[in-house]
Amino acid sequence: MSIGIVTAILFILLALLLLTGLPLAFGLGATAVVLALWEMGPAALFLLTTTAFSSWTSYTLVALPLFVLMANFLARSGIADDLYEMMYHWMGSLKGGLAMGTVLICAVFAAMSGVSAAGTVTMGLVALPSMLRRNYRKDIALGCISAGGSLGILIPPSIIMIVFASLSGASVGKLFMAGVVPGLVICALFVAYIGIRAQLQPSIGPSIPEDEKISWSQKLRLIKAVIFPVALVFLVLGTIYTGVTTPTEASAIGAFGALICAAIKKSLSWTMLKESTIEAFKLSVMVGWIVLGAKSFSHIYAAIGAGGYILELISGLEVSSWLILLIMQLILFLLGMFIDPIGIMMITLPVFLPLSQELGFDLIWFGVLFTVNMELAFITPPFGMNLFYMKGVVPPGITMGDIYRSILPFILLELLGLILLVLFPELVLWLPNLMMR
Amino acid sequence: MKLKYLRQVLGAIDAASDWAGRLSAYLIPVMMLIMTWEVVARYLLRQPTIWAMETSQYLFLATTVLGGGYLLLHGGHVNVAILYGRLSTRIRALFDVATSFFFFLFIGALLRSTWMNTVDAVVDLEHSPTYWGPPIYPVYIVMTLGVVLLLLQGLAKLIRDVMTAITGKEELSSRVAAGRQDQEP
């Protein structure tokens, strides 16, 4: 049977299993086993254990639970309240200032954590009630949080980038650094949009009342509360950038440093340690098993020569590589409306990685474009994880429809950011190319 | 009467997964300490270790494999909710019974090949090929153990799903997962 038909049958089987609720990890793994038995016989199943061993002893993946641990320690030390308090007084008097400031805090959060839930949930709890109380229009207040939270996976550290690196063999350190400028660009687009709209339409984000304004010395004092965590972020990213430590070692130092920050803030407790650890554990086990499923699938899929087949098929089309890039982005965008980022990653990368290699795209650049696509997947209705996180924390009067409407302008801005990164690859590659190694 | 024994067996499987998971979770802070120590040893003591990196890799393997059953028990293995999330409990249980064949196909195959690897590693008293070269067979034993726990938890889930599909009620639902460990039904 031709590889084309086998591929079609496999993807139909996988789609059926996933739609009927089988967890991703097992769906991918089972499809891999079916393929192995069908094409190569039971002897090929030894691949499962070798794949499990190599995936789960991956040095890259060790960073995953540790970065989550770092984020949890920091989040539970009350850093969100301190940051918001500072931002409130520094930016509150600007029109739209609280919303712009919330996006900036999300960017800082993104540099402390590798997931987009962290920024969204904490800012939803801290910033949203405060903005609504100050008569911010709800679409701006909601949108800036869901969109700002999605920066979590683009600004390093990033769980999505760690998984991408472990599947593609790209350098985590370089991917991290490649995310910095694009993250700032998209963050700036969000801030500029809010600022310009608030100038034209002051009613969407009024400045805070005069009697809440405080003196400069008080403003400076507010900085003190956030100086340790922010210094820690620079330390972690700095050691990766200079090559002093590997990203995995940096994750350990980050988690350890975050523990010290929590101790300084006197928020260290046995419960806090336990809950942070269990949360990091759940995420890393989940990803670990999905990586096993996906790698088994792609190893066996590659072993029957499918990679070559797809490349032949595509290059036979004789279309420009840009068109194929566009189609890939379109597929990722459409999948993002319905499936969560880890799932999209596992389903598409076995095909997209060899394809982008064949087309001569830079792996780091492609990884960043992919990550921006995953950011979009977090915020595109109807199934955007960030939108669901928001629904979980908003006050009762706000509907899912409000949340959907609020995110639309930010989706367009993020798409604009994506286009900029495609047109100007230097935005992505400048910083990683400056690195020592 | 029979249900009582069944409930006991299921409870024992739940407890095993839960304990294995919670214990292995604490390997994560251990990984943090080991890797932090490695950096301290390299830059402050000028004596890099030969064991830190490899040890943390094996610890990551242990958390992941031992956490498989725990995560299944607590419903943490992520799935696609587009259709599945909208179904009634009973229909969902029916779907789970149907797809469990594929779960067992994958985990069964994984167990078979991991078991064969483990036997080889134990018989040869296999050591890691690195400079440090620690014995590697304990790692394989942990791997087999973790896959067995996941398989058992999958079996427990299947039994529960069959009951739910037949009766339409979640009669045997896990007390550990619901956080009601010390309370008799």
Image (cartoon, coloured by chain):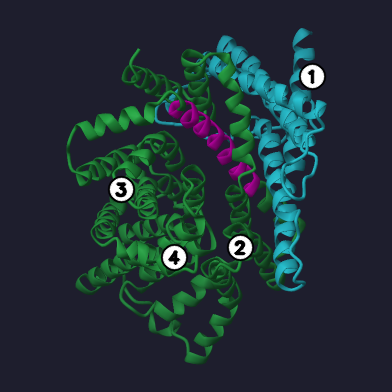
The three-letter code of the residue at mark 3 reads Gly
> Which residue is found at the position 65% from the left and 61% from the top?
A255
Is residue A48 located in the magenta-colored stretch of the structure? no
- Name the residue nearer the viewer: B70 or B120: B120
Q: For mark 2, what is the residue? A: A250
Left or right of B138: which side holds A321? left
Q: For mark 3, what is the residue? A: A360
How far is the residue under mark 1 from the one under mark 4?
50 Å
Q: For mark 1, what is the residue? A: B8
Q: Earlier in the sequence, mark 4 or mark 2?
A: 4
> Which residue is found at the position 74% from the left and 48% from the top?
B27
Quadrant in the rendering for residue A179: bottom left
Residue A352 percent across, percent down from the top left? 35, 39
The three-letter code of the residue at mark 1 reads Gln
Query: Is disc 2 on the same chain as disc 3?
Result: yes
> Which residue is found at the position 50% from the left and 20% from the top?
B92
- Name the residue nearer the viewer: A251 or A23: A251
Task: Report the predominant secondary structure element of the magenta stretch.
Answer: helix
Judge depth for marks 1 and 4 and give the one in front. Answer: 4
Answer yes or no: is residue B172 visible.
no
Judge depth for marks 3 and 4 and give the one in front. Answer: 3
Work out whether A321 lies above or below A132.
above
Crowding at dot 2, Cα within 10 Å, few <14 / some 14-19 / many 20+, comes out as many
- For chain B, give the colour: cyan
| SS assignment at label 4 | helix
How far is the residue under mark 3 from the one under mark 2?
31 Å
Q: For mark 4, what is the residue? A: A107
How far is the residue under mark 3 from the one under mark 4?
32 Å
**Mark 1 touches mark 4? (CB < 8 Å):** no
The magenta segment is A279-302
The quadrant in which the C terminus of chain B is found is top right
